[in-house]
Amino acid sequence: QVQLVESGGGLVQAGGSLRLSCAASRSILDFHAVGWYRQPPGKQRELVANIIRGGSTNYVDSAKGRFTISRDNAKNTVYLQMNSLKPEDTAVYYCYCYVPRGTIRPGNYWGQGTQVTVSS
């Protein structure tokens, strides 16, 4: 099992910033991928950003240039720095990780989600 605990969500005005944190219950170096999804009201969940083992990162087009994903291996924590927030960024943000086969307890794991609301 992997527990992922998110924090840092909240209400912010358009143009503002938030930093989300995701603390994992085991070493994030075990993960093939770790990152963030979001689910806006009435819409499907979408990948926002992730880090692949080895350090490469991926972002949804709407987040490029505004969001930055990073990790602190010593703290087993992944961050999502969100700048220049827009009302369309309003969503529940979920941390996730993928533990590959050959590693203890492989599978996909999700956090409980944290609400981000951007007012116009």
Image: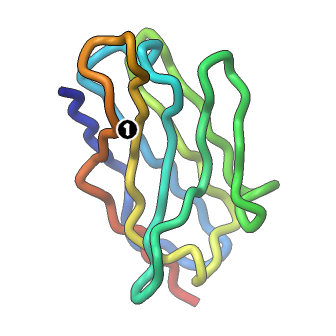
Say which residue appears at 43% left-offset and 9% top-offset. Answer: 74
- Label 1 neighbourhood size at 10 Å, few (<14), some (14-19), many (20+)? many
Which sits in the foreground, 67 or 119? 67
Which of 99 and 18 lies nearest the eye of the viewer?
99
Task: Left or right? Give the position of 113 relative to 21.
Answer: left
Q: Is residue 46 above or below residue 8?
A: below
Q: Which quadrant is home to the C terminus?
A: bottom right
Q: Which quadrant of the view contains residue 116? A: bottom left
On screen, residue 15 versus residue 31, left or right, reads right
Residue 42 coordinates in the image, percent (x, y): 41, 89
Position of residue 29 relative to residue 34, above or below, is above
- What residue is at 71 percent from the left and 51 percent from the top? 59
Is residue 68 toward the left or the right of residue 9 in the image? right
| Kind of residue at disc 1 | Cys
Instruction: List the residue tagged with mark 1.
Output: 22
Q: Position of residue 109 (x, y in %)?
A: 30, 40
User: In what quadrant of the picture does the N terminus appear?
Assistant: top left
Residue at image position (32%, 60%) is 114
The part of the image, by quadrant, that contains residue 69 is top right
**In the figure, 96 relative to 92: above or below?**
above
Residue pushed farthest front? 101
- Marker count (numbered): 1
Residue drawn 45% across the image and 22% down it:
31
Q: Nearer the viewer, residue 37 or 6?
A: 37
Q: Position of residue 54 (x, y in %)?
A: 67, 16
Q: On the image, which quarter does residue 106 sit in?
A: top left
